Structures are given as C-alpha cells and as structure tokens.
Image: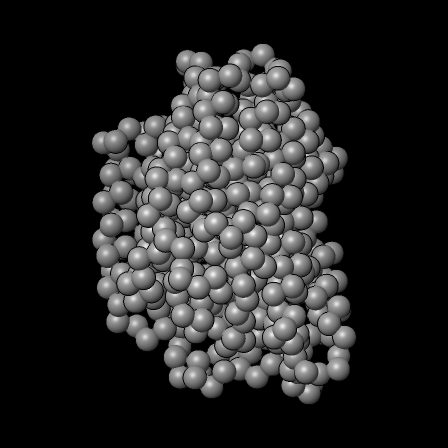
C-alpha cells in the first residue's frame, strides 16, 4: 500500500471511525467489567473476592506496564502492523474471557486484553495523526477522545443490559463484532506511515515491562490477601517483600536502558513529578470507587445488576460534559485552580457517601447527589491531570511523558482495587457490610484529598501552549502541539 501522509487526498472520516473503534473497545472495557463483577461472583461461588479482583487488576497492570512499550513498538515496526496485532490480541483475549470455564482462564484472557489494549491504543491515535494535517490535529484528537469518553459513559448502562440479558459472558463477547468490523474496514482504509528509523535502533525494554508487571502483581497480591489471611501469612509476607525488590530492579534497569518503560529523566521536571504523584493518588481512589459503588448497590441495597448500572450512569455522563469545560478553564486560570476544586469535589462526594448513604435504598436523596458531585469532581480534575503532567515537557518528549502518566493511572488503579478488596473482605463475613463500605468511601475520600493537596504544588507553565493529553508516544514523531484551551 502506498505510504500515507496528512497531505494525501484520502478522506479522513473512514480512518477516524476505524481508529475510534479501537479507542472505544479499550475505554469500554475499563468500565463494563465493573458492572459484570457481581455476576462473576455468582458464576464462580468458590472463588474469593480477592481471586476475582484479578479480573480487574490484571488488566490494569498489563495495560499500564506495556503502554510505553506499545508506542515504541509502533514506531519501530509500523503503526498499521501494530494496530492489527493489538486488535487481534485484544479480540482473542475477549473471546477467551467469554468462553472461560474457570477464573484462571478468565484472568488469562484479561491479561491478553490488557496487552492488546497497550498496543492498540497508541497505534490508533498515531494512525489518525498521520492522516490529518497539523492544523486539524487538535480538533481531531479532541473528537477521538470524545469517543473514549462516550465509551466510559456507556459502559455501566450497556454492561448492565448485557449482563442482565445474555449474561456476563456477553460483556466480553460484545468486543468481537466491533473488532471484526475494525479489522475488515481497517484493512481497506488505514494508512501505512513509515516506521521511524531512529526507533529501529532501540529495541523497547520488554524485560523492564515484565519486571514492572511482576512488582505490581506481587504488591496487589499481598494487599488483596491481607484481610483474608493476616499479615503473618506467607502468601502476604512473601509478595509484599518481593515487590520492593522487583521495583528496585525495574528502576535500575530503566536508568540504563536506551528505550526504557519509565524514562527517569522526565522526572527532572517538577510539574511532571508532582502531576504523576497526584495522578497515582487520584487513581487509587477512582478505580476503587468504580468497582466499590457497584458492589454496594448490589450487596447492600440489593439492586439488580441492571438497576445498579443505570444508577451509576449519571456520574460518567457528567464527566463527559464537564471535561471539555475543565480543559478550557485550565488554559485561562491555570491547572492548579481547576485541579484543587475538582479533587475537593471528588473528596466531598465520597464524604457524602460515607456520611449520608444508609442501609435502606434512597436513590434520589442519598445516592444521586453524591453521584452528580463525584462526576463534577472527576470531570474537572482527571483530564487536567494529564495535561498538567506534560505541560512542562518539551514537545519532543510529550508522547512518552503522556504514556508515563497513563501508566501511573493504571498502577494507581491496580493498587486501589487491591486496597478495596482488603477493606471490604469477603461477602457475608461477620459485621456490618454498610460499615465496610463507609470505610471504603472514607479511604477513597482521603486519597482524593491527598491528590488535591499534591496538586497545590503544580505550577502553570509560562506559555499556554501545551501538547494534547493523549497516551501515545507516536505524538512525539507526529509533532502535535496545540493550545491548552483545545484540550476539551
């Protein structure tokens, strides 16, 4: 196929739609599985909640560990080739999840999904940028990001309908027709931008990604088993002891490898360090609450899965509406002025849940106000954290910097879910279930507040020109650079 550039006469909309399908699949999977979790607990009654939590954390760990690798591999081998490889791996993982007869195979499928997503997402936006002129990149990437926001917002309601109808397996099988459509259409319309010669000489650090995955997996295992087994149990002590050693080995390797998973030189920029630390703390609250709220509605209020999915949907809808406003406002008054109120709203919403939500259902007076306030807080802060993380970096380092920020988000999510499991324990244990969920909301409120306190140290860059907050190293080669007021 003839090499494609942004100046080609080929229409943009088919490329946009195909690459958006890839983003839709990845984003939908971040939220739809949370809705299916109660059904999975019923389908595998012999598995502990800690065992089942790996269905969520395995995806986050692998996705976060391989995201930078996925971007570098696309640069090295070609975006089109990596797009189809990621799409095929993700679809294969979805099929394995849907057909899995055991928890072990289901987790294996989630590992494949996470790996596929880490290669699919960077390649999809890289192909899109290769097909559009520099003047239109800001608008195009914003629309592409809107598709991701739509998928996250649709996840709870779509997941609840699928799980309540065909069953939990449909939450994974739904990816297959979308994947087939993206493959067949993509073979016809996707360009073939040349691989970047500089990247060919630098093989990505696959061993470093493995070390990071093992370190995070060991940490999550130790935390999630803590409540069930106790601190002195070998299955808790051993992974918690090994995790720091693996993490130290990973950092040492990252300092020496020419194409590391974690580019340590980026952390010389103070705003980058602070924003990623704030992202880590924020994600530890965010991912715990995404799953925890569904579990509360089904276990304490005894909502059906359909009703629970619909009950949490207003929050993501508010996020989708507010996030554009947040980006434009951050351009005018600064990142800190948006991040701190956003984190405060998020923490206040979680405090509302902890103090006002009772054991008896009261959706309009107790749940809905907290959900709307939480959506406002997340919409103000989460997108702006990504922009703040890369704002102080030079344009040539934006792609890998943005990917590192997304890695921090996934790492925080994996740890947050493990802590959630440790707080809630197993269903049916002695004591009040409501009290355990109150502890979960209190923990998450504390992490959200901590993120806001960290964000107080984020400085607005001297110039308002920053790069688009997208987790893709390919932007580095594409040279995308837009104004911060176009982030929404």
Q: Nearer the viewer, residue 155 or 225?
A: 155
Give the residue at x 64% y 82%: 5
Give the residue at x 38% y 41%: 451
Q: Quadrant of residue 220?
A: top left
Q: Nearer the viewer, residue 246 or 416?
A: 416
Give the residue at x 41% y 14%: 430
Q: Position of residue 161 (x, y in %)?
A: 73, 36
Q: Nearer the viewer, residue 362 or 375?
A: 375
Left or right of 166? Residue 405 is left
Give the residue at x 57% y 74%: 79
Residue 203 visible in the snapshot? yes
Residue 298 visible in the snapshot? no
Q: Quadrant of residue 306?
A: top right
Q: Position of residue 145 (x, y in %)?
A: 61, 56
Q: Quadrant of the C terminus?
A: bottom right
Q: Position of residue 347 (x, y in %)?
A: 44, 31
């Amino acid at each position: 196929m003839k090499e494609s550039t942004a100046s080609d006469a080929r229409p943009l909309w088919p490329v946009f739609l195909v690459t958006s399908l890839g983003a839709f699949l990845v984003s939908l999977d971040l939220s739809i599985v949370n809705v299916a979790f109660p059904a999975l607990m019923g389908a595998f009654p012999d598995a502990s909640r800690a065992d089942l939590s790996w269905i969520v954390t395995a995806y986050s760990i692998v996705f976060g560990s391989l995201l930078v690798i996925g971007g570098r591999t696309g640069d090295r081998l070609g975006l089109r080739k990596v797009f189809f490889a990621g799409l095929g791996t993700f679809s294969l993982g979805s099929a394995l999840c849907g057909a899995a007869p055991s928890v072990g195979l289901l987790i294996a499928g989630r590992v494949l999904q996470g790996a596929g997503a880490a290669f699919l997402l960077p390649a999809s936006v890289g192909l899109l940028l290769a097909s559009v002129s520099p003047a239109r990149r800001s608008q195009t990437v914003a629309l592409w990001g809107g598709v991701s926001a739509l998928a996250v917002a649709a996840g709870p309601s779509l997941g609840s309908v699928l799980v309540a109808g065909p069953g939990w397996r449909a939450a994974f099988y739904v990816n297959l027709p979308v994947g087939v459509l993206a493959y067949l259409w993509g073979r016809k319309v996707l360009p073939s931008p040349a691989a970047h010669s500089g990247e060919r000489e630098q093989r990505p650090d696959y061993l470093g990604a493995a070390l990071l995955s093992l370190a995070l997996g060991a940490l999550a295992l130790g935390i999630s088993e803590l409540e069930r087994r106790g601190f002195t149990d070998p299955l808790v002590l051993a992974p918690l002891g090994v995790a720091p050693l693996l993490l130290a080995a990973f950092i040492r390797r990252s300092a020496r490898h020419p194409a590391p998973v974690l580019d340590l030189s980026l952390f010389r920029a103070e705003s980058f360090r602070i924003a990623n630390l704030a992202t880590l703390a924020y994600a530890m609250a965010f991912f715990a609450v995404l799953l925890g709220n569904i579990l509360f509605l089904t276990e304490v209020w005894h909502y059906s899965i359909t009703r629970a999915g619909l009950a949490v949907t207003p929050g993501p809808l508010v996020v989708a509406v507010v996030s554009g406003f947040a980006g434009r406002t951050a351009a005018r008054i600064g990142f800190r002025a948006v991040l701190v109120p956003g984190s405060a709203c998020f923490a206040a919403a979680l405090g509302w849940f902890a103090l006002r939500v009772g054991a008896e259902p009261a959706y309009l007076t107790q749940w809905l106000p907290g959900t709307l306030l939480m959506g406002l807080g997340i919409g103000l802060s989460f997108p702006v954290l990504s922009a703040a993380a890369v704002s102080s970096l030079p344009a040539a380092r934006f792609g890998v910097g943005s990917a590192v920020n997304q890695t921090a988000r996934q790492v925080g999510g994996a740890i947050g879910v493990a802590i959630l499991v440790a707080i809630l324990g197993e269903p049916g244990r002695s004591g009040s279930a409501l009290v355990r969920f109150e502890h979960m909301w209190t923990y998450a409120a504390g992490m959200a507040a901590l993120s806001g306190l960290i964000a107080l140290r984020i400085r607005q860059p001297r110039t308002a020109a920053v790069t688009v907050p997208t987790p893709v190293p390919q932007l580095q080669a594409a040279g995308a650079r837009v104004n911060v007021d176009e982030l929404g």
